[in-house]
Amino acid sequence: MSSNSSNEKYLPYAADAEVSLTAEELLVLQRQYEREFPRVRIQTKFNYAWGLIKSSTKREQQLGVRLMQEIYQEHAERQRECMYYLAIGHYKLGEYASARVFVEQLLALEPENAQAKCLRKLIDDRVSHEGLIGLALSGGALALVGIAAAAFFRRSK
Amino acid sequence: MRRKSVERETESSSFENATQGFIVGLINRVIFRTSNTLINRLLNPRLLKPNKRLAPLTLPPPALGTAPSLLSGFTTFLDHSPTDEPRQTAEEFDAMLKATPASVVPEVLMERRDEYSEYLRTLESERADVVRRLNDVDARILRAVAERRDIEGRIAALAADPGSPEASPLVDAGRATVEDAEDAAYEQDDVPRLRRLQHVFAGHYGGVTGLAYDAVAGLVASGSLDTHVRVWDAESGACKYTINGHGDAVRGVQFYERFLLTASDDSRIRMWDLSLLDSVQPRGGSDLGTTPPMTPTMCRRVAPLDLCCESTFTGHGDAVTCFQAEAGTLISGSADRTVREWDLTTGQLRQAIDLTWAAKDPARSVRAGRRPRGALSLPGRAGDAGFVGALQFYDCALATGTADGALRLWDLRTGQAHRQMFSHSMAITSLMFDDQSVATGSLDGTVLLWDLRTGQVRQTLEFEGPVTSVQLNRQRGPAYDAACWIAASDHRITHYRSNAMQRVAYASDFGLLNHSMRHDHTDAWVSRIYCRDEDTLISGDSEGVVKLWKV
């Protein structure tokens, strides 16, 4: 079965999440979701959640992650897929720790999944990238603060 | 200390994010080596909530791939959304409007108006597309007509030469020639001839790809690679209508009630109302030779032919290769690796079955007795499993033959294949079943007769060339007996009885008056046969000639 899941049509690569839907398409999905409220079908909910995660505004991504979370909790048979989508959602939001947790869980269950491995690599790269930037900036900030403090104390002395 | 904190606050927010990212990175790199659960508790406050999502999963969730992916439903839905007409009809909308409270009514009306303007916009763009394609086709027709005149001129010049045989021009449209079985110019083979050739319908200039016969109305329909569909009268032999409603080669035709369904490589299936066609083409079929080359396209708003098109089923992404309509349901298979089920009365899509997903499940397959030639049919080559070569359905049971040589039986209610039978080594080109057995013909030159209940191959027939068409008919009688007609890419049609296991090959390449003048043996091979009752057989060949036989 694992060969099934590494099919690109089954789980999208993370790059697919960067391409957002047009406003009209998202509106269609939203209307479909609202029409079926409160007992929404899983496919409708997933369509809407995935469409939201793909968008570029933070608010919509958060809403999408929340909906995907609900699918994860309600439908046990879809949990593996939801783990992957939740990982992508958290990755886009910037919560790399949660994203990492989900990807590790998925890889523990499906070690051969190409998309999950790729996503884990992406998360690691992004984390170390931001880590380096943070390191440089905080080093520079500390240096500035140190110079300012030294200047202040020298003046006061 | 206070100044430090004040200064830190005045930095930009990206710095804060960066430091947070840095801390996360540090902890990620240091502590991840030990355990994940520590991170869960330390870092993200949301994770501290006693969420079900981090409780140890009591049962491992089912593996990926046991059900169609959610993503496939997403992409299918998106492909549909822009071009749909507004879902509710006018009456439903009025009823709904009466039920809504007055404060919401203007919004609802505006929504409805927006839906219609969206729909109009898509129609406009489709229309612009179609007009462009019509212009292209006009240009091509102009060129073809010019070439034809050129060739005719050359032939006439040759005919002026004394001593050359009578060189008749290319086959005329719509003329039927009834040929007696004893044709002097036909070289005698030891291959017997098909009993009685009744009519020869010539008029297509591309190979015949689809045939249908309506015994009640006495009509024969043929679709061909030249993108035309012709409807012939079975008694008189004349061409009743010519339908050029497709932009690409026609792959299949079928009569259904008073309609004619045609499917083509341009990924559309169109349903034509035959009673309306009478009023559109009273002359009995237009001929390409008399099409006026200078049709002013400015005047062409809606071709009257389109008025006869009752509905068009769009939605396939690629060429439609086979279809069948029965009892209000239309099932079509396509090169875009899906099988779609449509409702004939409303024209809506009921479900789309993605074949590539179902193909990669070796656990459920039944290995039939005959080992396939070569190792090509193993499920590893799953990419071809989507291309549907032939299908047939009865009630909610569907049988498909695909390009990987697998015969699959599906249940339409669940959309799952409950059986896969691998025995062909190359793509299946045609398939037909009755209540007890399935006959499949494939490019590897074999026809297999399967038993539906056990899933095993009962009989194997081998031919020299790829099998293009198979028809299976249940014979009347106490024991089970089936008669098959097989076309295998030469000019012979083979008849096979399953009880007696006897096969007889009939030659079919005679009947055209002027063909014997052109070559001794025609190169045309039979591409399609159609036989649903015991006494009428229709065959179409690769030159575009359709023949009606009484057997």
Image (cartoon, coloured by chain):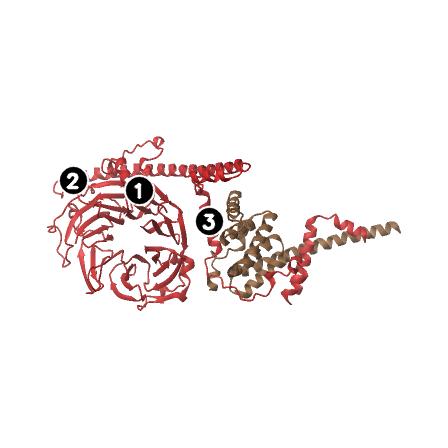
Chain colours: A brown, B red
**Position of the C terminus of chain B by quadrant:** bottom left
**Sequence-wise first label, 3 or 2:** 3
Rendering coords of residue B107 (x, y %):
53, 37
Identity of the residue furthest to the right in this view = A157
**In the figure, B471 relative to B82: above or below?**
below
Residue annotated with mark 3:
B77
Tell me the amino acid under the disc marked 3: Phe
Question: Mark 2 belongs to which subunit?
Answer: B
**In the figure, A57 relative to B63: above or below?**
above
- The label shown at residue B159 is 2
Considering depth in this image, is B158 or B401 the residue closer to the camera?
A: B401
Q: Are marks 1 and 2 on the same chain?
A: yes
Rendering coords of residue B34 (x, y %):
64, 67
**Sequence-wise first label, 1 or 2:** 2
The Cα–Cα distance between marks 3 and 2, rounded to whole angstroms, is: 62 Å
Question: Mark 3 belongs to which subunit?
Answer: B
Q: Is residue B419 left or right of residue B30?
A: left
Rendering coords of residue A109 (x, y %):
53, 65
Considering depth in this image, is A85 or A36 the residue closer to the camera?
A: A36
Considering depth in this image, is B518 or A81 the residue closer to the camera?
A: A81
**Position of the N terminus of chain B by quadrant:** bottom right
Residue annotated with mark 1:
B272
